[in-house]
Amino acid sequence: MDTIGIGLLGFGTVGRGVYRVLQQNRELITNRLGATVEVRKVLVRDPEKDRGIEVPPDLFTADPAAILTDPAVQIVVEVVGGIEAARRYVVEALTRGKSVVTANKDLLAAHGQELFAAAAATGADLFFEASVAGGIPIIKILKEALAGNRIIEVMGIVNGTTNYILTKMSEEGAAFETVLQEAQAKGYAEADPTSDVAGLDAARKIAILASIAFNSRIKLEDVYVEGITRVTPADIRYARELGYVVKLLGIARETPEGIEVRVHPALVPVAHPLAAVRDVFNAVFVRGDAVGDTMFYGRGAGELPTASAVVGDIIAAARNIRYQMRGTTGCTCFETKRVKPITAVETSYYLRLRVTDRPGVLAGIAAAFGNNMVSLAAVIQKTTGEIAELVLVTHRVREANLRAAVEELRRLPTVEAVANIIRVEEWYGG
Amino acid sequence: MDTIGIGLLGFGTVGRGVYRVLQQNRELITNRLGATVEVRKVLVRDPEKDRGIEVPPDLFTADPAAILTDPAVQIVVEVVGGIEAARRYVVEALTRGKSVVTANKDLLAAHGQELFAAAAATGADLFFEASVAGGIPIIKILKEALAGNRIIEVMGIVNGTTNYILTKMSEEGAAFETVLQEAQAKGYAEADPTSDVAGLDAARKIAILASIAFNSRIKLEDVYVEGITRVTPADIRYARELGYVVKLLGIARETPEGIEVRVHPALVPVAHPLAAVRDVFNAVFVRGDAVGDTMFYGRGAGELPTASAVVGDIIAAARNIRYQMRGTTGCTCFETKRVKPITAVETSYYLRLRVTDRPGVLAGIAAAFGNNMVSLAAVIQKTTGEIAELVLVTHRVREANLRAAVEELRRLPTVEAVANIIRVEEWYGG
């Protein structure tokens, strides 16, 4: 029976999870793979530290070379996080012909091209399932299971923290700041929550998914990003009244004018499969020209769900080593496609305005939309005293036109404020 | 550039879909695979028939040997359906060392063991993604992506016809027979709908999924099966009042006392991800010890969704041929596990009784439950004239106890009828 040696770089939450899963399912994995996977070394800063998990102490090393140069380590698992050290380790491992499994989306976003080139040079495998949507095997699904499809769109709830916040805001009517503090107390949000709530984490993930789906390298800079900080309980309430829920979506769509790739809050129809995705769960909705509408749901983070993805990759890498068939699914960016600017995107919009409650107000507003070829699908008006809140949903229109209409609205004396604008993702499928 | 030759056995709905997808995405597939996939021959009964799709006429043959013995055909795609001829073709193809892709769950259920043995003998690949849940790549997910997990349960809506019927019954309040006729008119249900509505189609699929999930051969005879014919609009209404929807589920679960594997209507909490799966859509919910709760959603049937799965398998088989790495994921039934009888299953139950509206009725009924250690979680009573309808939901209990309680109920003079009993699948996850 073959034994395949693993070197773990890092022993934080994910590293410990990987070690645990490999131990607890050792026999099962051996039977499924037809080979044994053995952790040979674990890179940590302080090998003496007590980690509250039973690991033979001689497994720990503080010397990366003890892993990267050991011929008995065939698969290097990078779960050290960060960018610079991780990059050096991964490039060295690949250059030495070792297969690499990483969970590091920041590394891929920053240096993906270099890493894939290093892998291609030695024919080593580079797998990264855990970098997007934790336990959901969306990368394998896109690269392999749906490989017969031209992918039309990928739309995902790929950040658990913001989905938790929006779920709580929606179900408890609480304000963003209140729920954020609660999420921080529970450990669902970081002390500095910017990367999550500003949409950057989701943007990195949708860039990876878009690159795979459309076979063209999409970089973080290509992604239009808006976070959830401006979403209010009022917006969520109006959305529900109109038949929608508010979700932070990563959206990637191929259109004849180029690829749309964006992260922003969006109104999603309650009947859409993504609307039912609550709490910290993630889900990725994929539309293919053959398969139609599909959705893949699960936990996007956490020790064991992330470890599930890493161990799945380890098993795939080990199988390829065992059968001497590595490097068969490398970088799939064989095309170069144009990315559409956000102003060229066509979608529907939800707008919440504060207006003076006076005759003729609506006529002026309607004219501002009409002048810019924006037509309206729904209007709600709520009046309190002299000020009315006006909520509008447009039909599908080019964002440039919507922006021009909003400029006109802002100049109207009857419009006190354009309080919020949120894009609407209609669902025509089913 | 390599070219890999395909022989299509059958040119019905799925066969045409496979041909269409391979043509329309030819360049994309070539780029993703690094090789060209070429349909060399198509087996049909009448090569002269006009099929309303552009295919070079010399591709058609009525002679299976023209495909099975052609060295230029490396992958045989069996979409001819039925069992006997399909079995002969598949065994011959595998014996000649050709990889086989099949969409035929009946064939697998009846002769899976023989086919896997034939594949193992020559090291050929045998793929069957399309046999379960159409476009949802659940087999690849279970065999590969989640291979690091001990699977705890698989629970699926794997029959589109019955999900369509239950959705319509639920949303329109219509009776089973009415909706069935409508489904037949739309082509969603067969003229003889028995296999679907009696749960047999779902049973074949859950047997395949259970075998893969638990690495033990589960046969159709192992599956406890109840169909949806006894579900009434009243049951669906009461279920909604109690916070559930009614779905036909295939359930496979590993417990310390053996494997549970069953198909029956079930009450599912509205917050469960499966509850939102409407219409002809399928979804498979999988709980793994590492990944936690996941769900995979999509179309379970139809020309192009099924073709998506078949073409995904063709690409995988072609990649393995190209890299000379076939036979790496054969039969995974390396264990032999006991299947639990249905009477040993523990779950909750919904019961609808017709009772005489008389003092003391509930006391007698409660005693029948209490005598058999069945405790109640919810009771609804609706009275019309002399007869009351009593709806009960039990706590978790062994089915044998529930059955004994029902026997006692039937002997009570105040109980006119036990009108229906439906199992309840609670969801503790989230």
Image (spheres, coloured by chain):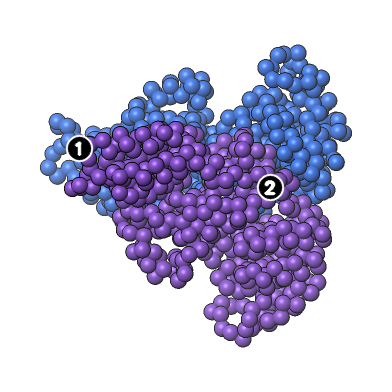
Chain colours: A purple, B blue
Disc sitting over residue B382 in the figure: 1
Q: Chain of mark 2?
A: A
Q: Which residue is mark 2?
A: A216
- Say whether marks 1 and 2 touch (CB < 8 Å): no
Q: Give me the C-alpha separation between circle 1 and circle 2.
A: 62 Å
- Dot 1 and dot 2 within a common chain: no
Residue at 37% across / 43% down in the picture? A409
Q: Chain of mark 1?
A: B
User: x%, y% of residue A88?
Assistant: 72, 71
Report the residue at 53% width, 41% height from top: A345
Q: Secondary structure at mark 1?
A: strand
| Label 2 Cα neighbours within 10 Å, binned few <14 / some 14-19 / many ≥20 | many
Q: Amino acid at mark 1?
A: Lys
Left or right for A387, reference B266: left
The quadrant in which residue B83 appears is: top right
Task: Give the x, y percent position of residue A150.
Answer: 65, 38
